[in-house]
Amino acid sequence: MRVVVLGSGTGTNCKNLLKLQRENKLGFAKIVAVFSDNPNAGILEIAKQFGVPASYLGSYRQLSVNELKNSSNSDQLWIDTIHKEKPNLIVLAGFMRILSYHFINSFNSQIINLHPSLLPSFKGLGAIRQAWDFGVKITGCTVHWVNDELDMGKIIDQAPVHINPSDTLESLAAKVHSAEHLLLPSVVTELARKFHE
């Protein structure tokens, strides 16, 4: 199963996937390319360190809701470039942009997103802080299929994280990220197994 990863930041989840791939622990999944909307994103350097092609594709323009519905050209470069990789799965790992309907429809039922909360709670940006500020006792992370509603696609799997009285926002973030590093590879490996069957 050919996998393309999109990310905007440091790329720790991508690094974890690539490390497991190097150790032959991703089953039938193979990461074939990494793309970013941020020319300085750590994810690009990480991919290169693992010998995986990585490219900055230019800023993925933030669109209004109306543009998201009607846009057909703003992300065509992204669509065309990713299609060349013949992906069976696109993984959003810290990709900080909302995809247009046109993009989502171009890769129908092939895009998953890793989100740092137990959806449907705490959608959008700053999910870990949202959970912290709200005072919940359990948060976590979710991998879900991407559809045209923000963080509302069908949930594939989740991992809970308990918030202890001794936790700080920083320690909670570290626990959620640790949970992500277990959840995302598990989902990718299982999807690849089903794809291979």
Image (spheres, rainbow, N blue to C red):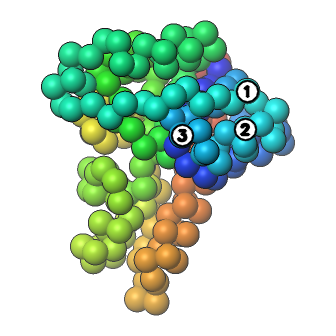
- Give whichever of 43, 15 is nearer the camera: 43
Farthest bottom residue?
Answer: 166
Residue drawn 56% across the image and 17% down it: 82
Farthest left residue?
Answer: 66
Q: Which residue is mark 2?
A: 47
> Is any atom of residue 187 visible in this view?
no
Q: Amino acid at mark 3?
A: Asn
Q: Amino acid at mark 2?
A: Ala
Residue drawn 35% across the image and 68% down it: 129
Report the mark closest to the observer, 3 or 1. 3
Image x and y of residue 148, in percent: 27, 28
Q: Which residue is mark 1?
A: 53
Q: Amino acid at mark 1?
A: Pro
Q: Would you identify the image quadrant in which residue 4 lies?
A: top right
Q: Tell which circle, 3 or 2, labels the residue nearer the N-terminal end.
A: 3
For label 1, the SS is loop
- Marks 1/2 in contact by CB < 8 Å: the verdict is yes
- Give whichever of 63, 187 is nearer the camera: 63
> Is any atom of residue 79 visible in this view?
yes
Q: Would you identify the image quadrant in which residue 83 lies?
A: top right
Asked whether, in this view, residue 23 is left or right of residue 171, the answer is right
For label 2, the SS is helix
Distance Cα–Cα, label 3 vs label 1 = 15 Å
Image x and y of residue 149, in percent: 24, 34
Total numbered badges shown on the rendered structure: 3
Q: Which residue is mark 3?
A: 38
Image x and y of residue 9, in percent: 55, 49
